[in-house]
Image (cartoon, grey):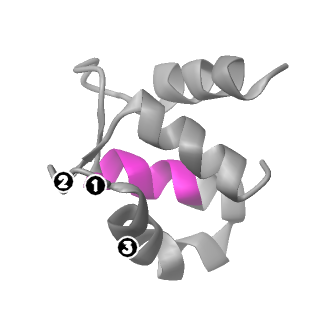
Amino acid sequence: MDREELANKLFEEFDTNRDGVLSHGEFKGLVECLFGRYGHKTSDEIFAEFDKNHDNRISKDELIELLIEHQL
């Protein structure tokens, strides 16, 4: 599975309101799933770093960049 497919599957799972972006709360759930308890503490920092346009949402493109950066 490539990163784009992974991003699509993660979006399907964590975009609970189906608006095409991950809210801060949805993103926290994703980070906790990927990184466990450690993720809870760092999700705010990761969110701020990858919310490139500062719209308080993570787009699919921003998520793909995050996956590449963290080699997931």
Residue 62 is marked as: none
Q: Is residue 36 left or right of residue 59?
A: right
Q: Which residue is mark 2?
A: 56
24 to the left or right of 65: left
Give the farthest residue toward the left.
55
As helix, strand or loop, the secondary structure at mark 2 comes to loop
| Residue drawn at x 65%, y 22% as measured from the top left | 4
**Label 1, label 2: how far apart the Cα atoms are:** 7 Å
- Does the CB distance between marks 1 and 3 fall below 8 Å? no
Tag 3 near tag 2, CB within 8 Å? no
Q: Which circle's residue, 1 or 3, is located before the other in the chain? A: 1
Q: Amino acid at mark 1?
A: His
Across and down, in percent, residue 21 comes to 30, 31
Q: Residue at x 79, y 52 (%)?
A: 71
- Give the number of the disc on residue 44: 3
Residue identifier under label 1? 24
Tell me the distance, in whole angstroms, between the alpha carbons under discs 1 and 3.
8 Å
Q: Which residues are magenta?
A: 24-31
Reply above or below: 56 against 60: below
Instruction: Give the structural element (helix, strand or loop) at label 1.
Output: helix
Asked if labels 2 and 1 touch by Cβ distance under 8 angstroms, the answer is yes
**SS for tag 3?**
helix
